[in-house]
Amino acid sequence: MRASLVLSRRDLDFLLHEWLEVETLAKRPRFAEHSRETIDAVIDLASRIAVEHFAPHNRTADEHEPHVVDGRVQLVPEVAAALRVFADAGLAAGTLDEELGGMQLPQVVAKAVTTWFQAANIGSSAYPFLTMANAHLLVAHASPEQVQTYVPPMAEGRWFGTMALSEPQAGSSLADITTRAELQDDGTYRLTGTKMWISGGDHELSENIVHLVLAKVPGGPAGVKGISLFIVPKHLVADDGSIGERNDVVLAGLNHKMGYRGTTNTLLAFGEGVHTPGGRPGAVGYLVGEQHRGLTYMFHMMNEARIGVGLGATALGYTGYLHALDYARTRTQGRPVTGKDPAAAPVAIIEHADVRRMLLASKSYVEGGLALGLYCARLVDEEQTAEDAADRERAHTLLEVLTPIAKSWPSQWGLVANDHAIQVHGGYGYTRDFPVEQFYRDNRLNPIHEGTHGIQGLDLLGRKVVMGGGAGLRVLAEAIAATTTRAAGTDWADLAADLDALTADLVRVTATLWSAGDVDVTLANASVYLEAAGHVVVGWLWLEQVLAAEGSTGDFYDGKRQAARYFQRWELPRVRPQLALLESLDTTVLRMDTGWF
Amino acid sequence: MNIVVLVKQVPDSGSERKLDSSDNTVARASADNVINEMDEYAIEEALTVKESQGGEVTVLTVGPGSATDAIRKALSMGADKAVHVTDDAVHGSCAVQTSAVIAAALQQLEYDLVLCGAESTDGQVSVMPALLSERLGIPHLSGARKLTVEGTTVRVERQTDGGYWMLESSLPAIVSTWDTINEPRYPSFKGIMAAKKKPVETKSLADLGVDPASVGLATATSRVLDFAGRPPKGEGVKVADEGDGAEKLVGYLAAQKLV
């Protein structure tokens, strides 16, 4: 296959097979039906559909964003056509149990599949991935009857799903949501309120839309402890599974975004009486699990969702990098510093050192980000299917501590790769004649949604590294040490030594931060902590990659080694000043009076 | 309705393809090998006929061990079983020799209809269906853009430059298909998993009763004597626009007989 500008199959194969050895998962009962053959065939299928049906309308969907005609959301027809192909291929059901129509695909393979679609067209791919997250939550927490009603149609790609958490006045702070859910005599609930930023909230792409809605039952505890989770379908479902009455949830408006334009983003109104199911207003909802535990159920899905956002950020950075690389190889401009003869033919811009600097930086970010995302997805498989309970527990702890990094690091550095891709294109990169500007706009969402960068910093420093008496950070340090030990006697001993030293510094600085005696001081610079820890983690995964490439020769492996060297020489040195700032318990930002701005 | 589809694994036409300089045969070991793109249309057509008429679709390939990838692809699209003829002696065979091997394999199968792509993208000799027709003594309907089966009769629309011919024959017959005949389906997730369990029978020349000395490069009826890469792209022609750019451009295109 001609090298794709969507994603690198070669890199994916290296990471999945040569590094993560995903084929070994087939020894576990849940994955016994899988093999190298089926894994490769599934990725072949995904890459082909992504390239042939999703990438071609990426620009079209961006240029013709969703709009409302006679109360119905209109999208370019290519979106529905691509999603039909996706569903017909059975890709919507990847990791679900066979009995629910799924294929019990390992998470790490499923994430490799989704990365293809995210790189090809982040807007259109959001619909099935939101649906899968919705279905996974139901499988984990809903009643067997609810699972049977809602999950198979979603697995078949006939119904889509959403996550309705935020409200106009309450985004990051869910404690302040005001949507109410009142218990009815028949055990159902009636919801009233508005939900904001709901991706996929309304459209004509599917027969039904299953909203998972956070709301408060009157009389419950205040704050997040009073939040419950409800299934609110756009159309009520009859006992035989057929589409029934229209529920009282309606589109109140579309948000017009900088990127991700193929994904409808909506303000939804619940219980306004536009429709009257059962003869009266109020959106009919069905409680998932127990009252007041809604946020706990949502958080169950957070690791998976956050890894998915991180991989989406990597995917956009990756495709931007590949486009920039292709452009730099073919665009001629200028002559070498040492050969300025105007009669000589101009060289491809990749011949200029500064262009290679941007490409190499981008390569280190996107390949590092892909390694990070797939490593975390592999941990999900370990957490769920490792034979030994201690291994499952260890995987769980490591995943907990890595999740904020897996979400935020690619969101930050994948975006830098997109920035470099524009720069490599020069003036053309700033025009709409080339796709790199769209990749940048699309990727700009990722540091914001699914927990902002700032919230991820608070999660890492405030919660994850100190949970279980510091078990999170301890397990991470052990994992890094296990790799650096393997590097002894190789060409990478110096990188291993750098990582050992930085890890020790990170552990020490963490203790210093928590000894401040004032949690405001401890957490004031949490975003810096997140970035420093992120670079150490990705440096570690670069060491992992070059150790997996030991003894292998050829351009691909030499490229891996040079990117690892770049990360060591150019990127890891960023960490020490960050750690020094943190260790000084700097309060410059904290003490900045709001009136002084 | 038993349908046999001929499938070949070829170097990806989208990648750089090479000949092996030691014997001037296609360098398969180092290539990015895929199922011959044209064969996917034949598979799709076979599956469509099976869906309306019932029966079984068998995939038949001649090729090295790695050709199982092409077989699995066909099985994951929905074919029922496969026969893989693999034997080192076949290496370097010409179309005439290969047709003898395929014909021998077909004679061991029950078939009503044999389908194949119009050509393979590596050799592009495009004579296999005609050779098989001759060897098996069955009708050959080439270049189909449409195919229908009624009872023991097959009808095809043969695509031509100016339109089409309507052809008809009795079954069994061999039909080669163009890429205008259908839109091949993707393998499905379920199909990929099911393909693992579908039977693939491996046969050697001995199993087919073919004399190894009758095939292979040494006795091939045609062989590649020499080859060269495509010449590097030359410098383009620059047209300086001094107010007459369009005129010059049209003049250039006309001189090249492009307009």
Image (spheres, rainbow, N blue to C red):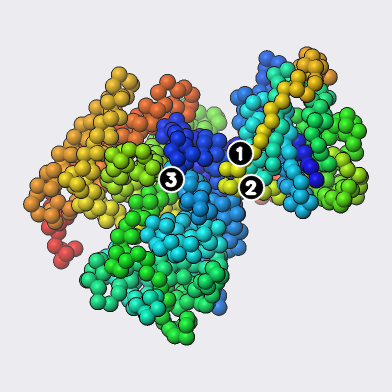
Query: Local crowd at mark 1 within 10 Å, few (<14), some, or many (≥20)?
Result: few
Q: Position of residue B6 (x, y in %)?
A: 76, 36
N-terminal of the pair, mark 1 or mark 2, is 2
Residue at 87 percent of width and 50 percent of height: B151
Residue type (three-letter) at the residue carrying disc 2: Tyr
Residue B165 lies, with reference to residue A191, above or below; the image says above
Q: Position of residue A225 (x, y in %)?
A: 24, 66
Residue holding disc 2: B186
Given this view, does label 2 or label 3 mark the residue nearer the observer? 3
Label 1 secondary element: loop
Q: Chain of mark 2?
A: B
Do dots 1 and 3 share one subunit? Answer: no
Given this view, does label 1 or label 3 mark the residue nearer the observer? 1
Q: Is residue A363 visible?
A: no
Residue holding disc 3: A107
Residue at 14 percent of width and 62 percent of height: A593
Residue at 16 percent of width and 45 percent of height: A469
Residue holding disc 1: B197
How far apart in space, not on screen, are marks 1 and 3 (Cα)? 23 Å
